[in-house]
Image (cartoon, coloured by chain):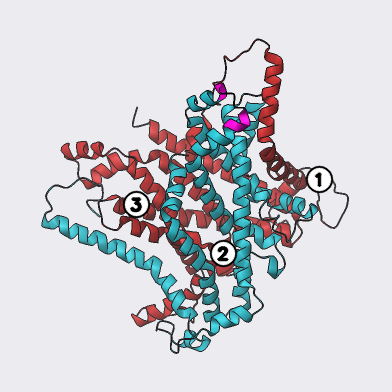
Chain colours: A cyan, B red
Amino acid sequence: MTAATGIPHRRPSSRRVTSATVLYIVLIVLALIIVLPLLWTLITSFKTDADAVRNPYSLPSPFSIDAYRTLASGQQPILLWLWNSFAAASLQTILILVTASMGAYALARLDFAGKKLVFGVIIATLLVPPVVFLIPNYLIVQNFGWLDTILAITVPGAAGAFGIFFLRQFFVGLPVEIEEAARIDGAGDFRIFLQVVLPLARPALATLAVLSFLNNWNDFLWPVYVLLSPENMTLQPGLAMLQGAYRTHFAIVMAGAVVASVPVLILFGVAQRQIVDSVAGAAVKG
Amino acid sequence: MASSALVTPAAPVTTAGRGGRRPRPRTRRKTLTAYLFLAPFLILFLTFVVAPAVFGLWISVTDWSPFRDVQHFVGLQNYINLFTPGSINSGDFWRAMGATGIFVVASVPFLLVVPLLVAILLNRKIRAATAFRTIFFAPYVLGVAVVGLIWGYILDTQSGILNRLLELVGIRGDIPWLVDVPWVWVSLVGVTVWWTMGLNTVIFLAGLKGINTDLYEAAAIDGAGAVRSFFSVTLPGLRPVMLFITTTTVLASANMFGQSYLLTNGGPGNATRTAIMYISDQGLSQNNMAGASAMSYILFAFLAVISIINFRVQRERQEGPAA
């Protein structure tokens, strides 16, 4: 890790070759630390329970899909959880994109009374940790009759300040000339927003969509408390239940982990560049 | 960057100069249009952010009980209780705050240093950089529950593969990873690094790409070695990103919940029961909503102070040597 600063090299000397070898070894070891637990999860899920306990680091013998069968016929509707997670994350993402983009347009482009106050309050809440909202929001959601419904895990979470703040920053940076040209052509604010600003903001909207989806998908504390019946659960609280139900049945627990991870990992594999760039870009530029 | 954006004044509106003969009705119509645009967001924001923030503060100064219709104002009593040694919740609350403190102090250095080193490696001209980046980031998309399932098995004292492997290579095979201190902390920090390392790595990587390569060449011409140019080019170049990452990482670690809930269940004893875990349990399972609300505001105050200190320190460092 000595030449770790990215100085362009002209003549590859033997020292350079050695340092490159060390570099690759370090990266490969790190990659193995990430990959091996996942690979081992997959392997264990194809074992019988007895085999999983007796031979934890061998290949499955016999190769068995008992764990998946038990999972499919058991009390834990894991595929339903998977669907609930997708539905909730998608719904919340759409809600955030619509409300935040409209609000951000007003904050970035329109002049109105109370603008500074509205923007100031939104910014101030960015710094409040989520635990502060936990108990009062639980009472509010309970009052609305939303406990144990998809509304509880989509609507309150869409109210956060991040989305509108992030999009406002992006809108402010857009050149105003195109909007002005549209205005001269007689377009109103809503048409300008819809037909000029939104298409220009597509990369920012995609970034916000990725971040919102991941955020909802990974949410754990809130769904643990507001979702109650097994069929309404999302993956995160559901899997915690699964772990409790099959504490020593490692093959079944690992099969649950596989079912829960494969769809996300495929999605991540397909869109990895977009996802990673979104996360990094929002942090560095946002 | 969140920090720089905080001081950006509201954007000057560029539609000025159109008409303007009768400003008042026009302004009023503009204001109406703007609030129509803002309405969907503001309805959500007022209902689920502003209202609960105020409502929570109110709950914390009452004797709130979900079983009673009328709640009484008790002033700062709930806060005073928490600061009174020996009162009903204060011991447990401060132990939980302590656990959160331990986790922040133990995890943040690793969550900063490991991703920084990995990002520096990935920023060199190497083959398959994208593939490595993808692999390092992958655990983050899995979510804490999957991570909890996988590591709950790996770290199991009797059946876990880690202890079996350690035994195989001749080290002790009975390390109580999830059931005894200090091993629980090693496990929680290790699992958190495994899970979220990729997130900070890709942010550092984006920061490194933004550093002008001419600076490295200039440093090399001046005779700076790899270490010198790391400290005089790389680190200064990463300053804005560093402020963002330290802030978000400290806050994320201070809000740790899932790892403890899934891996150690707060144990042994209550050693790894974090503040978030204790507050949510008190408020939503033990029906101590007033006490828990007061606790959440105390935690908020702590985090705000830490964020401000972090911001000040980093800004001083930024301005100090450069001036």
Q: Nearer the viewer, residue B49 or A166?
A: A166
**Left or right, B254 with reference to A228:** left
Give percent across and percent down for residue A38. 44, 70
The span picked out in magenta is A183-192
Label 3 is placed on what type of residue? Ala
Parent chain of label 3: B
- Vertical placement of A92 versus B241: above or below? below
- Vertical placement of B197 versus B30: above or below? below
Q: Within 10 angstroms of label 3, few (less than 14), some, or many (20 or more) residues? A: many
Magenta segment, principal secondary structure? helix
The residues tagged by marks 2 and 1 sit, at their Cα atoms, a distance apart of 33 Å
Q: Nearer the viewer, residue A42 or B33?
A: B33
Q: Residue beneath label 1, please?
A: B74
**Left or right, A94 with reference to B122:** right
Local SS, label 2: helix
Give percent across and percent down for residue B67. 85, 58
Local SS, label 1: loop
User: Does residue B310 belong to the magenta stretch?
Assistant: no
Q: Which mark is residue B260?
A: 2
Q: Is residue B179 visible?
A: no
User: Does residue A189 belong to the magenta stretch?
Assistant: yes
Q: Which mark is residue B119?
A: 3
- Vertical placement of B277 versus B158: above or below? above
**Left or right, A186 with reference to A228:** left
- Comparing marks 2 and 3, which lies closer to the viewer? 3
Parent chain of label 2: B
- Residue A252 image-quadrant placement: bottom right
Parent chain of label 1: B
Going from N to C along the chain, the mark reached first, 2 or 3, is 3
